[in-house]
Image: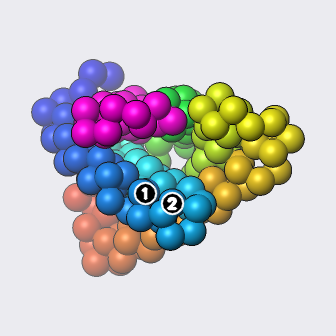
Amino acid sequence: MPFRSVDIAVVAVFSALWAALNLTLGPLGFSLLRLPILCDLSVYFPTLLATWLSSKIGVPTVVNLIGSLVVFVMRPGSTHLLGFIASAIVFDALMVLCRHNISFKPRCLSVTIAATAISAYLAGVLIGVIFMGRSVDWALTFWGGWHLIGGIMGMVVALLIIGVLERAGLGRMRIAQR
């Protein structure tokens, strides 16, 4: 199904948030901790919220692609973001298993957790091996693990916000249900 104007608006808003967080929180976390956990939080938090709002295939990938392009313009050396674009494609593909429906139903929640964990870990491995030039063992054990932790942090924050919005009755207003 093609994107409607509201889907494009969701993509625009959450791509901007993705870029803003990656230009601020990501480098801050890396400077302070020398770890990528805030980079992944900056990636998965807006990606999950956009997916929840739209429930449409392609939205996670497009949010990550546009957000990455904005960051590339601001920081041309940020080639590692290609790892996040690849992981967004995997996330998007895995979310098909629950029709891109992020909810607290056991099946949808399990798919969301698995899709986030797998794609965040994949991003870490790709970035570690391809863009940092480190060994596969290091990327599989150390760097992938830290990306996984950051992705889970972003997912927890997103799910907390989604839970609050759902309890406030705003879940019924999601774009997919219009």
Q: Which mark is residue 95?
A: none
Question: How has the structure been colored for display?
Answer: rainbow
**Is the residue 158 above or below the residue 3 in the image?**
below
Residue nearest the observer in this picture, 14 or 99 = 14
Q: Main secondary structure of the magenta part?
A: helix
Which SS class for mark 1?
Answer: helix
**Is the residue 1 above or below the residue 22 in the image?**
above
**Residue 64 within the magenta-colored segment of the rendering:** yes
Dot 1 corresponds to which residue?
26
Magenta segment boundaries in residue numbering: 56-81
Residue nearest the observer in this picture, 175 or 17 = 17
Return the x and y of residue 139 as percentages of the image width and height: 76, 43
Return the x and y of residue 131 as percentages of the image width and height: 60, 32
Q: Residues within 10 Å of mark 1 (few under 14, many from 20)?
A: many
Q: Are marks 2 and 1 in contact (CB under 8 Å)?
A: yes
How many marks the image carries: the answer is: 2
Q: Residue at x 44, y 50 (%)?
A: 43
Location of residue 164 by image quarter: bottom left
**Is the residue 110 above or below the residue 120 in the image?**
below
**Is the residue 52 above or below the residue 158 in the image?**
above
| 152 on left or right of 76 | right
| 28 on left or right of 131 | left
Amino acid of disc 1: Gly
Q: Which mark is residue 30?
A: 2
- Which residue is outermost to the top? 2
| 56 on left or right of 170 | right
Q: Residue at x 63, y 53 (%)?
A: 147
**Residue 7 seen in render:** no
Return the x and y of residue 46 as percentages of the image width and height: 36, 53
Return the x and y of residue 95 as percentages of the image width and height: 54, 39
Q: Residue at x 28, y 78 (%)?
A: 168
Residue nearest the observer in this picture, 139 or 104 = 139
